[in-house]
Image (spheres, rainbow, N blue to C red):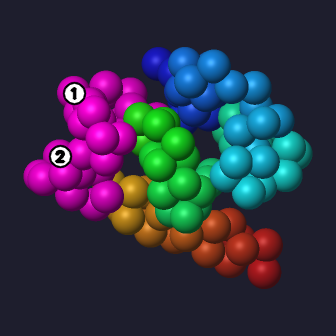
Amino acid sequence: MSSVGKRLKEEINRLGLKSNKFSELVKVSSRTQSLYENDHRKPDSGYFQIASELGIDVHYVLTGERTTLVESSTGEPPAGDALLSTLELIRKYTETAINLRKQQLEKKD
């Protein structure tokens, strides 16, 4: 099964972008982007929000399941229950990442 990092890289490639250009667009360093793509760090919700605005299928990146959402001809993002589900998934992912980080820090003490 593929990882979050591998699916993220796949989505960046689907958009026809290179990782270093994408990192500029989402406002992280090339090094941080590499850490995300290699599953050494987890992106936060702000990162995923920008990535979604750029066309990344965040639901796919997080779950491995493609969404059936398609932007309208005006370029507006999709709305409704599917969008809310994706935003809820991002919230849960971020919460889990924070909790995991706290546990790692507690183990070091």
- What residue is shown at x 86% (from left), y 43% (from top)? 30
Discs 1, 2 touching: Cβ within 8 Å: yes
- What residue is shown at x 55% (from left), y 64% (from top)? 46
- Measured from the top left, where is residue 67 in percent x and y? 27, 30
- Measured from the top left, where is residue 53 in percent x and y? 47, 49
- What residue is shown at x 46% (from left), y 46% (from top)? 52
* Relative vertical location of residue 18 with respect to residue 34 in this rendering, above or below: above
- The residue that label 1 is drawn on is 68
* Outermost residue, left side: 81
Of residues 61 and 38, the one drawn nearer to the viewer in this rendering: 61
Point out the image quarter for the C terminus: bottom right
- What residue is shown at x 12% (from left), y 52% (from top)? 81
Element assignment for label 2: helix
> Is residue 48 found inside the magenta-colored segment of the image?
no
Q: Residues within 10 Å of mark 1 (few under 14, many from 20)?
A: few
Q: Three-letter amino acid code at disc 1?
A: Thr
Judge left or right: residue 37 versus residue 11. Answer: right
- Measured from the top left, where is residue 55 in percent x and y? 47, 37
Of residues 26 and 60, the one drawn nearer to the viewer in this rendering: 26
Q: Which residues are magenta?
A: 59-88
Residue 97 makes an appearance in the image: no
- The residue that label 2 is drawn on is 82
Q: Residues within 10 Å of mark 2 (few under 14, many from 20)?
A: some
Q: CA distance from mark 1 to mark 2?
A: 9 Å
Res 75 → quadrant:
top left
Judge left or right: residue 50 versus residue 71. Answer: right
Q: Three-letter amino acid code at disc 2?
A: Ala
Of residues 58 and 63, the one drawn nearer to the viewer in this rendering: 58
Element assignment for label 1: loop
